[in-house]
Image: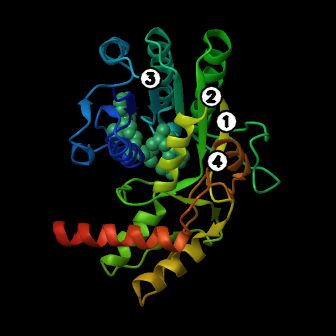
Amino acid sequence: MAKTVLVTGGAGFIGSHLVDKLIDKGYNVIAVDNLSTGRSEYINNKALFYQIDITNIDAIKQVFQVHKPSTVFHLAAQISVSRSTREPAFDALTNVVGTVNLLEASIENGAKKFVFSSSGGVVYGEVDEYPIKETTPFAPVSPYGISKMTGEYYLRFFKREKGLDYVALRYANVYGPRQDPYGEAGVVAIFINKILKGEKPVINGDGEYIRDYVFVDDVVNANIRAMEYSGTVEVNISTSKGTSVNELFKILKSLTKFNNNAEYGPPRPGDIRKNILDNNLAREKLSWKPSYSLENGLKGTIEYFKAKVKSNGPG
Ligand code: NAD
C-alpha cells in the first residue's frame, strides 16, 4: 500500500513542487494550506487538499487522526521578514504555535519523520566566516528568524522527549517557477517579471548584497532525501556559492537578451550584506547535492514566466 505523507503549505511555491514530486513517486499526499499566499491552481489534483489553518489545532488533529501520515513535511509559514517585524505576534502564532500544533499532532498519531523548512538565510544572522556551517550559533535578528529558530528548538524538544525523528532543512534563497514576484522575497522573480515587461528592475542599494541561490527542484529533492534519511539532522540546503544582485542581473540580462540597465534605489533596511551557506553536511548525511547551476535554474525560471505572461497577457 502506498505510504501517506502530509505537506503543509502544499499550495505554496516550494510546497506545491514537493507535492507534485511526491505524487510522481506514488505517495498518497495530503496537502494542507490556508491559501493565504498559496494558490489553489498550484495544488496537484491527485493530492487530497484541506483548506485549513495550521493555528487551528482541532482541525489539524482531525486530519492527522483520519490519515495518519508517516512523514510530515512542514512548509506552511508566514515568510515575510518585514511583516514579521511589523506583526511579530502574527508571525509567532503562525510559525511557532503552528509548528508546535503539527508536532503535537505528529506525536499523537504515530508519524515517523518530521521534515521542517527552516531558513539558513535568517537563523544565523550576520557572521564573520563564510560559507556558514551548521555549527555556527543561532543569532537571528528578525522575528521571522526567531520564529524559525524556535521551531528548531521545539523539534529538539520533541525528539528528546518523544523520540520524533526530524530533519531541519535550512534553505538558502530558493528560486524557480511559481515563485511569487509580488512578494518581497523573490528578487529573481521580480527581476524576470520586470525584464519580460521591458521595464528596468530596481536594484536596492549598491547591488553588492551576496546571496546563495538554490533552485526549487534541488530543494524538493532535499525534502525527499530527508524523508528517506533514518535519523535526525539539521542541515543547510544551498549551493555554497555567493552571487551578488549585480551579477544576478547580469546573468538574467544575457539569458533574456535584455538591452536596458537596472536602476539603483535606496537599500532595504535590515538586509544582511552576505549569506552563503556551507552544504557539505547535507552532501554527507543526506547524499544530496544541488544539481542545477544558477544559469540552468534561471533558464527554467525564465521559460516559466514567459509562458505565464503569454497566457495572462502583459501587465
Ligand atoms: P509560500 O508563501 O509560497 O508558501 C507558504 C505556504 O504556507 C503558502 O501556500 C501559504 O498559503 C501557506 N500558509 C501560510 N500560513 C498558513 C497557515 N497559518 N495555515 C496554513 N497554511 C499557511 O513560501 P515558500 O517560499 O514556498 O516557503 C515554504 C517554506 O520554506 C516556508 O516555511 C519558508 O519559511 C521556507 N523558506 C523559504 C525560503 C525561500 O527562499 N523561498 C527560504 C528559506 C525558508
Q: Which residue is mark 2?
A: 152
Q: Quadrant of the N terminus?
A: top left
Looking at the rendered structure, the kind of residue marked 2 is Glu
For marks 2 and 3 on the same chain, the one whose residue lies earlier in the sequence: 3
Residue at 59% over, 40% down: 169
Q: Secondary structure at mark 2?
A: helix
Residue at 49% over, 29% down: 95
Which residue ends up furthest to the bottom in the rendered image?
Answer: 259
User: In the visual, does 213 lie left or right of 21?
Assistant: right
For marks 4 and 1 on the same chain, the one whose residue lies earlier in the sequence: 1
Which residue ends up furthest to the front in the rendered image?
Answer: 1
User: In the visual, does 57 lie left or right of 73?
Assistant: left
Image quadrant, ligand 1: top left
Cβ–Cβ below 8 Å for labels 1 and 2? yes
Looking at the rendered image, the disc whose residue lies closer to the viewer, 1 or 3, is: 3
Q: Residues within 10 Å of mark 2 (few under 14, many from 20)?
A: many
Q: Which residue is mark 3?
A: 70
Reply above or below: 80 against 205. above
For marks 1 and 2 on the same chain, the one whose residue lies earlier in the sequence: 2
Estimate the spatial distance between the alpha carbons at disc 3 and disc 4, rounded to whole Å. Answer: 22 Å
Looking at the rendered structure, the kind of residue marked 3 is Ser
